[in-house]
Amino acid sequence: MDLITVVITLIVVGVLLWAVNRYIPMASSIKSILNIVVVIVVVVWLLQGFGVLQSIHNVKIK
């Protein structure tokens, strides 16, 4: 994973999240949940991209 790709992706995700928070009217609790979900997804993506979570695809939920 290139550093440029990571930076561009983080900028795009940040701008999209800011635009949703700024221009789409919704309850503050829903905005908080959306922000938390986006942050968790981005952190997991970064950890997987840098090789910290190499076996995330082998996790089985029963």
Image (cartoon, helix red, strand yellow):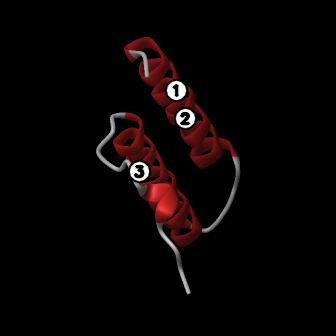
Q: Nearer the viewer, mark 1 or mark 2?
A: 1
Tag 1 residue: 9
Spatial separation of the CA atoms under disc 1 and disc 3: 14 Å
Residue at position x 42%, y 16% in the image = 2
Residue, far bottom: 62
Give the labeled residue for mark 2.
Answer: 13
**Number of other residues with Cα within 10 Å of mark 2, as a class: few under 14, some 14 to 19, many 20 or more:** some
Looking at the picture, does residue 60 appear above or below residue 44? below
State which quadrant residue 22 falls in.
top right
Q: Which residue is mark 3?
A: 44
Query: Where does residue 16 sit, x and y in percent of width and height?
Result: 61, 36
Q: Nearer the viewer, residue 13 or 60?
A: 60
User: Residue 6 in the image: x percent, y percent?
Assistant: 44, 24
Q: Secondary structure at mark 1?
A: helix
**Residue at the extreme top of the image, as rendered:** 4
Disc 1/disc 2 C-alpha distance (Å)? 6 Å
The mark nearer the N terminus, 1 or 3, is: 1
Horizontal side of residue 46 vs 34, given as left or right: left
Q: Is residue 10 above or below residue 55?
A: above
